Amino acid sequence: MKIVKNDLFDYKNRYIYQLEDGFKFSLDAILLAEYTKVKEDLKILDMCTGNGVVPLILSTKTNSEIVGFEIQEIIANIAKKSVQINKLDKQITIINDDIKNIQSYYKTNFFDIITCNPPYFKKNSSLKNINEYKNIARHEIKIDLEEIFKLSYKNLKDNGILYLSHRPERLDEIITIAINNNMGVKEIVFIMTKNSENSSLILIKCVKNSKRSVKIKIKDVSKCSTYQHIF
């Protein structure tokens, strides 16, 4: 199983290790990290961190403490290797465990911000891949939307923020689950990545115990040269 070292998109002096034949970072994770608003002196949690791309990008915007949870051991170890090569050991912590075990590491209501680029497809979806790593990353085998929102509510401070990337076709489900878990949907950004009338990605900002007030935005990256080689 070959591990390769790549530049982290167009971020100077940031590198990332990835499985050559495994699940590599995508535009979704990059846009989620760029969408996330951060400042100093925060506690940040990245659920389903994969190879750590979101924490690595967030570290270019803040010196705040960042924790990434990844359930797959090989992927978590690769993320740790990326943290080390970027000399970010004092800022980023990668934990190889099920995010549902988070209370073994942190008390409830601990984090200011949670980011999550989760599996997009339901467990019983027919869109299965023969690669187990990709299956777990893409399908709700280990965690689903309901669990993500329950964990977010439990681990965010009051008025803490969840930044989530997902598929537009599951938006109604996302909003319903968010409301049921007292996570107010504050903003939805429809991402246009190709010359199409339909959005292929949404970015969502939810705030714990907030009033309902939603802003809708559209971001067209289809003609942005910065992202073209990732499409």
Image: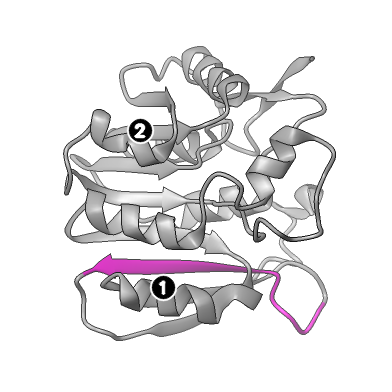
Query: Quarter holding the C terminus?
Result: bottom right
Question: Mark 2 highlights which residue?
Answer: 67
Q: Earlier in the sequence, mark 2 or mark 1?
A: 2
Whether residue 168 is visible here, answered yes or no, is: yes
Gap between marks 2 and 1 measured at Cα: 24 Å
Q: In x, y percent, where is residue 176?
A: 42, 79
> In the picture shown, does residue 99 fall above or below 168?
above
> In the picture shown, does residue 217 fall above or below 59?
below
Residue 201 included in the magenta stretch of the image: yes
Query: Quarter holding the N terminus?
Result: top right
Residue occupying image coordinates x 41% and y 73% = 177
Q: In x, y percent, where is residue 184?
A: 30, 75
Residue 6 included in the magenta stretch of the image: no
Residue occupying image coordinates x 30% and y 86% = 213
Q: Amino acid at mark 1?
A: Ile
Question: Mark 1 highlights which residue?
Answer: 177
Whether residue 219 is visible here, answered yes or no, is: no
Residue occupying image coordinates x 22% and y 42% = 40
Q: Amino acid at mark 2?
A: Val
Residue occupying image coordinates x 82% and y 28% = 21
Q: Which residues are magenta?
A: 196-208
Q: Residues within 10 Å of mark 1 (few under 14, many from 20)?
A: some
